[in-house]
Amino acid sequence: MFILKGIDQLQNAIAKAKKVRPRVEFDRFGRYRVSGSKGYYTVICRKDERGYKTVACSCKGAERGLVCYHSAAALSLHIGLARQQQTA
Ligand SMILES: [Zn+2]
């Protein structure tokens, strides 16, 4: 799990996501399934009680606090949906 502070920390993961092009499936707002090397991972994007945006992925890398490309892929969908909600 990591706290999203800015787009900068996602650059490498976004670059990797563009290369790997994982499948992102919408489960519900803030919860996505992203295809990885060993099947699907679940990515949860939410705001914690202090107002921090947190992203959690069920893969091994994310367990160690790394920003994985699954998170980046899910976030790009999540941010788009969040924008739509705000303008709706
Ligand atoms: Zn991951």
Image: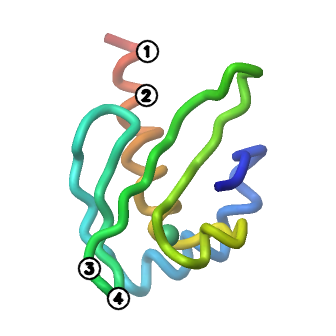
Image coordinates of residue 53 in percent, x first then y, are 65, 35
Left or right: where 26 falls relative to 9: left
Left or right: where 47 falls relative to 71: right
Callout 4 environment at 10 Å: few (<14), some (14 to 19), or many (20+)?
few
* Residue that sits furthest to the top in the current view: 88
Q: Nearer the viewer, residue 84 or 13?
A: 13
Query: Which mark identifies residue 39?
Result: 3
Q: CA distance from mark 1 to mark 3?
A: 33 Å
Q: Quadrant of residue 47?
A: top right
- For the point 34% across and 80% down, the residue is 36
Image coordinates of residue 60 in percent, x first then y, are 55, 78
* Disc 2 target residue: 82
The three-letter amino acid code for the residue at tag 2 is: Ala
Which circle's residue, 4 or 2, is located before the other in the chain? 4
Q: CA distance from mark 2 to mark 3?
A: 26 Å
Image coordinates of residue 83 in percent, x first then y, are 44, 27
* Disc 4 target residue: 37
What secondary structure is marked by label 1?
Answer: helix
Whether 16 is drawn above or below 64: the answer is below
* Disc 1 target residue: 86
Q: CA distance from mark 4 to mark 2?
A: 28 Å
What secondary structure is marked by label 4?
Answer: loop
* Residues under numbered marks 2 and 1 in contact, where contact means CB atoms less than 8 Å apart: yes
